[in-house]
Amino acid sequence: MNSNPASREATPRLARIIPRDSHPISRSRISPDALRVLYRLRESGFQAFLVGGCVRDLMLGIEPKDFDVATDALPEQVAKLFRNCRLVGRRFRLAHVFFGREIIEVATFRASSAPSQAEEPVEIAEDLIDDLEPSDTAGDTVDAHDIHDFDENLERLVDDSGRILRDNVYGNIDDDVWRRDFTCNALYYNIADFSVWDYCDGFEDVQARRLRLIGDPETRYREDPVRMLRAARFEAKLDFEIEPATAEPIGPLAALLAGVPAARLFDETLKLFLTGHGARSIETLSKRGLLTALLPNVGDFIERYPDSPPVRMLLQALANTDARVRADKPVTPGFLFAVLLYGPIGLEIEKAPREQWHDIGTILDAVDRAVTVIHRRVAVHRRFILGLRDMFALQPRLESPRGRRALRTMEHPRFRAAFDLLQLRSQFGMADTAMVEWWARMQSANPEQRAAMAESLGRVSGAGPARSGATRSRGGRRRGRGGRGRRGSE
Ligand code: ATP
Ligand code: MG
């Protein structure tokens, strides 16, 4: 089963060194800032390697998202070499070297397999949010640092499920490699002679597009259950095949995700769905039995109603998001959670009497209940939850615009996101396309035209701007067709 049994040996072995002429990594594809850091370290007498995802991606011809450097210099020594440097992390000191928007992360070799719960995930997701929502980042920040209280004097702390909570021993490159997750993420590119160092047949695995955990898979997942999500993410992102021994424990161990800090799972969720392969991520998560462990009501809904309009809408929304990421357009976590939770929110709405389905109170209660379910696992930032509530609360107003209120609706900061949601709903028969067209015309109209459109809306006394087929509720509020809870399975 395991094509490379050597990598499961208890005793680490020496690296295979692949010279420059035997691998495809060219310096022209490496960020000049990363090269600057590597050369500076090297000139100062330290070892300096690129490591992790960037080496893997360079081998695959993919443009790396970021460049990570590993060195034998201690964090304080790194800090002395670079003025534009900040040391981060409480448990693991890491150096961040800043070049404008680019951050090169420099990590000192570490001696054991501890997951660095306080490093990359937080930083990367923060970057992501900055990129995604430049105007919406004020306020809360992700804090994956609050994991557990621990004894500063202990070098390693493991909980009773085998999860490593803390580990803080520096080592050399021969040690550093064994703490990494997958063989494809454990290749080192040496700036001294441009060779690639490979301790665990990662080179071969990348060429074969194979995802394989270093060491005993079950132990490695227990140490850090997030590795299961990472497996599904790399399967989606890289189109790698997860080798059987690495894949098998995932389903049985999926429930361990419940013990992972929710802030960290939020970061991972964004990486799964907002970095260009969200449509495939939902597939691989479902296939691996991880979706329900990560987002319980989302997973349940997809299992129960796989071909329903909300699920088809979700898949379409993820595909749209992937296209936007590829085109370097902004995407928002709020919208992501709106489409993920659309089906579960619909189910919550349907618990109320039918005549209340379009009441704002019913809708917001339903949103809150659905959010609460995922919030136990994934700490969705408050600002995104507020955005989500607005998007849902605006749906009835968009479906039944009334006179000049329509103008105010357009001023709402979430109008555009709510409109996008309405448009998506209409594509799957869950909202009236005539309303989408009307709002599209409103948006492209000038102020006088807008006012006239809104007025005429008022004059037809609730008959609606077009053949919306809407009915009037008792309170005089019209209802759009195909409430958000409507499912194909009904
Ligand atoms: P990408 O940047 O495409 O998301 P990556 O492999 O670079 O993928 P990062 O989260 O940036 O992922 O982590 C950098 C490297 O750190 C990984 O390649 C891996 O070697 C190591 N690493 C990250 N997370 C873990 C983990 N949970 N357990 C073990 N090693 C990890
Ligand atoms: Mg990376």
Image: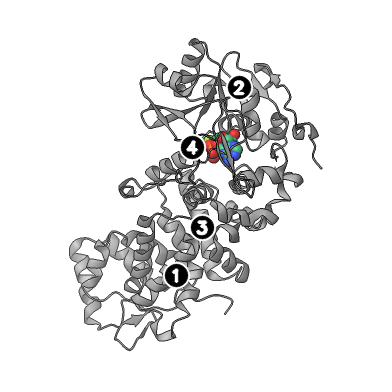
Kindly state the secondary structure of the residue where label 4 is placed: loop
Q: Earlier in the sequence, mark 3 or mark 4?
A: 4
3D distance between C-alphas at marks 1 and 2 = 49 Å
Mark nearer the N terminus (4 vs 2): 4
- In the image, residue 52 sits, relative to residue 194, either above or below, namely below
Please state the horizontal and vertical placement of residue 268, each as a whole percent of the image. 52, 48
Asked whether mark 4 lies closer than 8 Å to ligand 1, one says yes
Name which of mark 4 and mark 1 comes first in the sequence: 4
From the image, tell me which residue sits under label 1.
369
Q: Is residue 220 left or right of residue 96?
A: right
User: CB atoms at circles 4 and 2 under 8 Å apart?
Assistant: no
Label whose residue precedes the other's in the sequence (1 or 3):
1
Question: Badge 2 is on which residue?
Answer: 172
Residue at point 41%, 16% (across, down): 81
Image x and y of residue 338, in percent: 44, 62
Label 2: how many residues lie within 10 Å, few (<14), some (14-19) or many (20+)? some
**Which amino acid does the dot numbered 2 rest on?**
Asn
Mark 1–mark 3 CB contact (< 8 Å) = no
Res 240 visible: no
Q: Earlier in the sequence, mark 2 or mark 3?
A: 2
Note whether residue 8 is visible.
yes
Please name the residue that numbered disc 4 is placed on: 119
Q: Quadrant of residue 438?
A: bottom left
Distance between the Cα atoms at labels 2 and 3?
A: 36 Å
Q: How is the image coloured?
A: one colour
The numbered mark, 1 or 2, whose residue comes first in the sequence reads: 2
Please provide percent x and percent y for residue 197: 66, 22
Secondary element at image label 1: helix
Q: Nearer the viewer, residue 249 or 60?
A: 249
**Disc 3 target residue:** 377
